[in-house]
Image (tube, coloured by chain):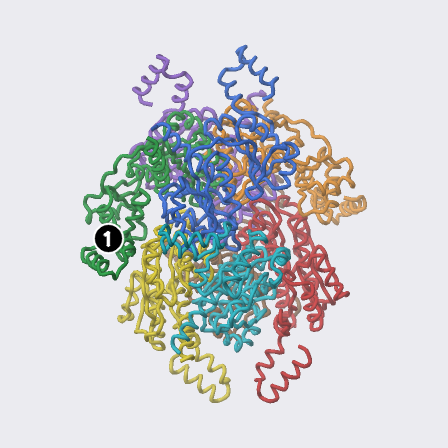
Chain colours: A red, B purple, C brown, D cyan, E yellow, F green, G blue, H orange
C-alpha cells in the first residue's frame, strides 16, 4: 500500500468514515490491481503466499516477489520457465533460480524442526520431487532425498528401509501406475503425501493413471495432491510439521 | 448339424454342386441359427469354444453346452448366475456349478503339464481369481492359489517368494490401484498376466483405476486383460503353456 | 495361527529347517486362507488393520473381527449394510453398529491426545462425515462436528470461526462442487483433509466434480482422499496426530 | 448484397417470379459465399452478430468486420491473435485491438443503462474476464472490475461486499476448482454468470474441473457458459439487461 | 431457534458477553444440528431456501419444511419420491405434492410480474420441465408451457413463434443432442436458460451429450445449468425477473 | 385434431383471421398437449413418425399409437418393456408385440423393393439386431438375418460371403470391440450401417468400446449410429432404399 | 508387381507349385513391403484405395500414388500438409493439390450420376466439408455446396430449402454442438451423413460434443462418421449412390 | 559402484558393521544418485534393465547405457529422439541407432531359440512394430515382419496364413479400431500380444479406441500392453519364450 493511500485510509478511520474493522481488513492485503496479496493469510497459516507463475507476465511476477520479500524472510515463485527467469532477473537481480524445480526465490528461511523425506519411483519424476524438496527447504525444514526406488525392483526400496524411518513426513512422487505410495504407506507410520506425476505415455493420460492409483491405494491414510503438484505436497508437509512443532512447544 | 442337412450337403459335394473346400468349411462349425459353434477353432487353438452367459437365455446356454460336450472332453459356460444355473440343470442335470467362479461345466479335462499360480491382492478379488483358476483347471493345468497379498503389507508377499517361483505362469488379480502385478512382475521371470477387478469405490470407476495401473506398470512384460476377465487370463495362460508343452515335445 | 501349525513352525526353527527370519515373518500375519491379517503393520503404524466389508461374506467379516479383537483393543469393519450387520451379530453378539457411519466395532479405544474437527458442506454429507468421525473416535481421539456450513451461505461458516480454530486436524467433507475445503484451508493453519462425497446428480458424476474441485483447490496444502472415503481421512488424521503426539513425548 | 444482385432480386419480385416473403428473407442476411451474415438476428436480439476468429483467414475476418460495420454502430471479432490483427489492420487500418482480451473492434457503442461487474478468482483469469468486460463495454454497458478475490483468501472478497452490490449482473470468472461463483451467488440476489477458465494443470483438465464445479454449485440460480467463454457471458448479461431496460421503458 | 436459546443469547448481548454483530449473525440462521437454515440469504436474494431431498430422511425434510413455512409464505422441497412424500404427509398433512415435478410445497406465493416460458424438445423431458415450471409458479411468476417442439420437426417450433415471443425469460429443456436452445436462442432476444436432461441412451451418457451441446451452442448468450436441474433454471429466471422488477420499480 | 378445433380453425381461415399458410402448418401436426405428432414429416420423409417408449406413460404411448394408426398404414413404438405392453394392450387390443425387439406395432406395411441384411457378431447382439430387422420389415423391406459371425472365427463370415452379397444395404451389429463392420465393409460395395451394442463388461463401458471401434474403422464409408440403436439403423437403411427406389422409378 | 516376381509366380502356377487360387489372391494386391495395395477391393467396391497421409513419408505417399494411378483413372491422398505436397511434387510433378481440403490427386474421374450436397454450420467447418466435396468430385459425382447455415440463424437454412431438396445425398458438417444434421434430417427424406468437426474450444473437447450431438440426434436415420472425417462421409455417399445407380441400370 | 565405495562396503562387512545380507542387496544395484540400476533383476528375469529415455537428459542416458554395457552383452535405450541420439553419440561413439524404432543399442545379443512374428494393420503402425521387433532381436530372438494386413482387406491377411503359423509368439500392432488381434487370435493357437497404437484422429483419442478394442476382443487369450508400447510387447514375448526354452532344456 502506497503512503498516500495509507494516510487517506487512516484519516477515514479517524473521521469515522471507515470502521476500524474495515480498515484492519484492508490492511491485511495489498491490492495491486491485478492481484491482492494476502499477508494476513501468511500470518494465519505460517506459510508465505507464493506466486504461481503460469498466466502471469514476468513483470507481474517480479512485482509480486518484491512485495512479498518486504513482508517475509522468504519469497518464492513456482513454475517459472528459464526464459521467464531471465526477464525477472533483470528486474530483481538478487533472485535465485533452480532450473530442475523451476522455482525462483529470494531470502533465506529460518530453520524449523522436522525432516521431510522426498522419495521418487523413477529418475523422470525428479523435477516434481525437487519442486517439493526445494519448497520444503525454503520453509526451513530439513529435507532428505531418495530417488528411483520404484516398485518393480522392490529390493531397492526395502534396502532403504532405515532411511524411510528417518522422515517425519514422507512425500512420495510417482508417475506411471503410481504404486509406490501404497508400498511406502504400508512400511511407515508417519503421514505419507502422495504426488502423482505426468510421467508416462498412452494410457497414463498425463498422470491420471497415477492419480487414480494413489486415490484408490490399498494403504490407508495417504493424502493425495494434484498431478505434478510438488509444491502443494510441501505445503501439506509444512502444515503437518507446524502442528507437531506447536505441540512440541506446548508440551515442553 | 442334423442328419438331413448333412446328407444334403454330402450329396451336393457328390454331384459337384458344392466344392470340397466349401463343404469342409461348413462342416467346421455347427449352425444353430442363434449361434455358430466353431469346432475348427478349438482344433486350431487347443482351447474349447466356451459359452459366455450374459445375453443368452438358459435354454440357449443349455443347448450350446450339450453340443460342445459332444465334441470336447470339457464344456463350460462363464458368468452364470445361480438362478440361470438352476434352469440349465433342469435341462442338463449333469452340469456342475461353482458359485464363486460362476462357471458351469461338463466333463473332465485331460491333465496337461504346467503350473498356473493365481494371486490376489485382497479377499474381495477372489471371485475373479477363482474364475481364472477354475478355467485353468478345466484346461487340465495344475493351479496354485495365493490370496490376499496386496502391496500395502509387502511382507505378506515377500514371505511367499518361494511359492511365487513355482508358477510357470502367474495370473495376478487386483482391484483398487492394481499395483500387485508391478511388484510381482519384478520378482519373477516367467510370464505375468495382470487382471484388474472392479473391486473398489469412488474413483476406482468400476476397475478403470486398476486397469490403468496395470497398463502403465513400471514392470515390463505384463499382459493385461479386461476388467474382471479371469477367464481371458486363463486362456492366455493356456496359450503360453501349450507353446511350452509343444516345445517340450519337440525337443524330447 | 492354530496351535498345530505354530508348533510345527517352531519345530522347523528348532531343527534349522526354517530360518529365524522367515519364522518371524510368518508370525507377523495370520493366514486365514481367504485373508492374511497383518498384525505387524498395526504395530508399525499405530493403526489397527480394519476390515473393509464389500465383497466379503458376513461369515468372513465375523471371523476377521474376532481375530482382530484378540490382538487389538479395538476391532472395526467399514461399509457394513444393516442386513450384513444382522448376520454378523448372530456370530458375534457383542458387536456394536452405527447405521449412519455403517461401521461395526468391538472394544474400547485408549484415549489419545488430539482434536479432529469434522465439517460438512451439507446435511446429505453427514454419513461420510460420520464414518470419519466414528473412526477417529475408535482411534481414541477427541472429535468435534460442524454440519451444513456450505459456501453458498458463507456466514454460517465464518460465524463458526472459533470452533474451526479448536481442531488440530480438520476433515472437511463436501459433495456437489466440493468448494468448502478451499475456504476452510484459507482460514486455518493446521492440516486440512478434503473428502469428496458422491452427493449430487447429473454432472457431479458420482463425486468426480467434488474430487476435482478439491485436487485443484486454490488453497495450498490440502490432502485429498477418495470419494466417500471418510475412513481414509480419519486414518490420515491419525498418522498426523501420532506424529504430533510422538513429538510431544520426545520434547517433554 | 451487391447492387446487381439486389436489382435482379427486386426485378424478380416485380415480375412475380419471387414471392415477397422469400425476397424479405434473402434481404435479411448477406451471403458472402463462405459466410452468411444475419442482420435480422441482430435486429431480433439487440446484439450484433460477432465474428469468431478461429478457423477463418485474416482476409475473411476483415471482410466480415467491414460488412458488419456498415450495418451496426459496433463491429467486433473475438479470439484474434496479435499476428492475425496485424494482417487485418493492413486491410482495415481503423480497427482497434485489445491484446489481453484478444478482441478487434470498429465503431463506438451507444451507452446503455446497466452495470456489469466482472470478478476473477485469480490474476491468471484476467484475459477471459477482460474478454467479457470489453464485450460488455462494446454493447454500451457500464463495466466494473474486481480481480483476484479467490475463495482461499475469503476476506479479500468479503471486504469488497459493497462493490459486489453495485452490479446489476455479475460475471464471475474462475479456473482451478471454480468455487468463487458459489460464494458470490450466496452473497448477491442479482443474476450471476459463471465462467470457468482453463487456468490450472493436471487434474484441472483444461478447465473441466472448474466447469463441473460451477454446474454443481450449491448456490442456486447460476448460469454457466463454456470454458474460457468470456464473450458468451457478456452476451447473456446483455440479454438480461436488455430485458431490464425494456421493463424500465415499459413501466415509465 | 427455541425460546430458551434465544433468551440466553439476548442476555449475553445485554451483559456484553456477546457482541451485537455476532448475535445478529446467529439470528440469521437456524441451527438444527443436522442443518443450518439461512433465513438471511432468503432476505438477501428474494428466493426462499429450498430443501433438496436426496440424502435426507423424511423426518429431516418435514422439520425443515415446517421451519421454512414459519419464515416464508412458501416452503418447498425438491426431488421427493412418492414414498417419501407419504411419510412427510403424516408429519405435515397440509403439504401438497406434484408427482411429475416431484416437488412438495406449503403455502401460496405472492404474484410477481414476469412470464417464464418453459419449452421442451420431447414428451420425455416434461418431468424436468415441470420441476422448473412449478418452482417458478411457487416464486409467484406467470408460467407458460410449450411441450414437444424438438428440432427434427422444426415447423412445430416455428409455428409457435408468437408464443415464444411472450416469454420474458425462456427455459428450454432438452435431452438427446440438446439442440433446441440453440435454435430458440437465435429466435428470441430475451434470456434463454438451457436445461439438459438425462433422457436418451447409449452415447447420451446420462445427459452429458445434451449438456455439451448446450455449452457449445452456436447461439450466444445462453445460461446453462446442471443436467435435470429444472429447479436451478427457475432460480436463475427468478434472479433475472427480480432484477427487471427492481428496475421497473426504480424507474416508475 | 378434434372436429370442433378443426371447424374453428377453418372458420378462422374463412374469415381471414388466420392466414392460409398458418392453417396449413397447424394441420401438419397433431397437438396432443404432451406431444406434437408430425404427420407432415412422415410425408416429407416416407418414414412414419415412431413412438419412442422411454419416459412416456403406457397411456401416452397408447394414444400416440392410435393416432398414428389413423394416418399411416403402420404405427409402431420402440423400447417397450413387456409390462408396458401389457398395459397398452388393454387400451389397444390389436397391438402386436415382439419381446426380443421390444417393439409394438399396428397395421401391415406395403411391400417395398430392397433387401436389408442384418448381421450380428454374437448371439447376445440379437435383440438390437432384431429391433433393426423388425423395423425394416415394418417399413416393407425384405429382411435377411445372419447371426453370430464375429471376427474371432473369421471363417464363419467368409463361408457366408454369398449371402453377404445379396443385401442392398447391410446393418452390422456388434458389441465388445465392434470389429465386424470393418471386415464386412471391406467385403461388400453396398452401404454398411454399423450398430454398436452395449454387450460386454468392464472396459466395454456400456458399448463405448464398440462405438469407438466403428467410428475409427479402417474400412471407409461406414455410417455409424448410437449404441443399441437398431431402430435408427433401419431408418437410415430406409432413407437409402427410398432413394434407390426413386431412382429406379425415375429411370424406368 | 515387378516383372521378375510376376514371371516367377506364373512359372510356379505352370509347374503346379502354386495353386491357381493362391496365385489369383497374390495378384489381387501389390506388396510393397511397407504397404499392400488392394486392387481387388477397389474392384469389389467401386471405390479406389486411397492413401491416408499421416504417419507415411512423402516418398511412400509418392510411390503409392504412382502405383494407384497405374490401376485407376483417379489416385488420391488425404491429410497432406503443404510441405509434404512440396516433396511429393518433386517425385510426381503432375500431382494436383487442394490446400483447403488437403488432398493430392492424379487423373480425372469418369462422371457418375448423383448429386452430393455438402452443407456446413459455419465458415470454420469449410476445410472438412471441402475434403468431403472434393473426394465426391474425384469419385465423379456432382457436388453442390451450402456454407454457414448453422441453427442459431435458422432462417438462413430454411431460405435454402429448395437447394436442400436437390441433393440425392446430404453431407452435413458441423462443429460446436453439431445440431445442424438434426434439423436437416427433419427437412429431407434422402440419406443424411453427419460429420462432426473439431471446431470449438473448451467443452467441445476437440469435436466430441458435436459427435455426441449427432449420435444422439432426435432426427432418425442419420449416418455418423468420425470427427473431421470428410473423406469417410464422401465414401459413404459413394456407396449409397453406387447402389442407386446400380438400381437405375437394373430397372432401365 | 566405484572402488572406494566398494572397499568401504566390504570393510564394513568384514568388521560386522554391515550384515552379509545387506551387503548383498547393496551389490545388487548400482546407485547413481539419480537412478538405481537393478542388475539383480536382470539376473532374475533374463531380461536386461533398459533405459527409458523420456524425462532423462542425454548425459544421464549415456551414463546408464555405459554402466549397463559393463554388466550385460546388450544395453539399450528406448524413445530416443534423433537429437538426443546425436548428443549421446558424442559421449558414447559406439552406440547404434534405429531412427524408426527410436532405439539406441550397444553390444550384440546371444542368439535364443524362438520366433517372434510382428504384424501391423497399417503402414503408419510400423514405428511401434519396429520398436517391438528390434527389442526382440536385441534379446536374441528370430523376428519376422508382416506389415499392412488390416482387417478391411481381409484377404491380405488370409493369404499370409502360412507365415502366421511360423511364429511362436505373435505381436499384433494396430491403431484406429484395433481389430486385427481379434482376427489373428482366432487364426492361431500361440500367444498373441496386442499392441494398440496412437495412429488415428478424432474419436481414436490417441489410441484409446484401439486399446479398448483389444481389451474387449471377442478372441480370448490376448495379452494387451499400453498404447504404442512396442517395447513392452517384446518383453512379454521374451518372458514367454524364456519359459518355452526352459521347458525345452528341462525335457531334453
In the figure, A73 relative to G51: above or below? below
Residue A244 falls left or right of residue C202: right
Instruction: Give me the chain letter of mark 1.
Output: F
Q: Residue furthest right?
A: H4
Quadrant containing the N terminus of chain A in the rendered view: bottom right
Count of picture labels: 1
Location of residue G56 (image quadrant): top right
Side (left or right) of F4 relative to B161: left
Q: Position of residue B151 (x, y in %)?
A: 56, 48
**From what the image shows, is residue H67 above or below residue F252?**
below
State the image coordinates of residue B238 (x, y, percent, origin top left): 50, 31
Q: Which residue is mark 1?
A: F59
Residue B10 visible in the current orientation? yes
Whole-percent x, y for residue G243 in the image: 39, 32
Q: Residue furthest top?
A: G15
- Location of the C terminus of chain A by quadrant is bottom right
Q: Secondary structure at mark 1?
A: helix
Q: How dense is the environment of label 1, judged by Cα within 10 Å: few (below 14), some, or many (20 and up)?
A: some
Locate residue D251, reporting x and y percent: 38, 77
Q: Quadrant of residue H128?
A: top right
- In the image, what residue occupies the spot 64% across and 41% down? G83
Whether residue F198 is visible, yes or no, is no
Residue at left offset 52%, top offset 50%: G124
Q: Quadrant of residue D81?
A: bottom right
Rendered position, G18 above or below H220: above
* Nearer to us in this view, H140 or E226: E226
Q: Give whichever of B196, E236 is nearer the camera.
A: E236
Between residues B202 and C171, which one lies in front from this camera angle? B202
Amino acid at each position: 500500500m502506497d503512503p498516500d493511500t495509507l494516510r487517506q485510509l487512516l484519516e477515514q478511520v479517524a473521521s469515522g468514515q471507515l470502521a476500524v474493522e474495515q480498515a484492519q481488513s484492508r490492511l491485511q492485503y495489498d491490492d495491486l490491481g491485478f492481484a491482492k496479496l494476502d499477508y494476513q493469510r501468511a500470518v494465519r497459516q505460517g506459510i508465505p503466499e507464493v506466486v504461481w507463475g503460469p498466466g502471469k507476465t514476468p513483470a507481474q511476477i517480479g512485482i509480486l516477489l518484491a512485495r512479498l520479500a518486504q513482508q517475509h524472510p522468504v519469497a518464492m515463485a513456482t513454475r517459472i520457465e528459464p526464459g521467464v527467469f531471465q526477464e525477472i532477473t533483470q528486474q530483481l537481480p538478487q533472485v535465485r533460480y533452480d532450473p530442475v524445480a523451476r522455482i525462483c526465490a529470494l531470502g533465506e528461511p529460518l530453520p524449523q524442526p522436522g525432516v521431510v523425506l522426498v522419495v521418487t519411483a523413477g529418475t523422470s519424476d525428479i523435477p516434481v520431487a525437487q519442486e517439493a524438496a526445494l519448497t520444503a527447504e525454503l520453509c526451513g525444514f530439513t529435507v532428505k532425498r531418495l530417488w528411483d526406488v520404484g516398485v518393480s525392483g522392490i529390493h531397492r526400496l526395502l534396502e532403504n528401509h532405515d532411511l524411510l524411518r528417518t522422515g517425519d513426513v514422507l512425500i512420495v512422487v510417482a508417475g506411471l501406475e503410481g504404486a509406490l505410495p501404497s508400498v511406502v504407506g504400508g512400511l511407515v507410520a508417519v503421514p505419507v503425501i502422495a504426488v502423482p506425476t505426468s510421467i508416462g505415455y498412452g494410457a497414463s493420460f498425463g498422470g491420471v493413471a497415477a492419480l487414480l492409483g494413489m486415490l484408490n491405494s490399498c494403504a490407508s491414510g495417504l493424502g493425495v495432491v494434484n498431478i505434478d503438484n510438488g509444491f502443494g505436497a510441501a505445503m501439506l508437509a509444512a502444515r503437518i510439521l507446524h502442528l507437531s512443532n506447536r505441540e512440541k512447544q506446548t508440551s515442553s
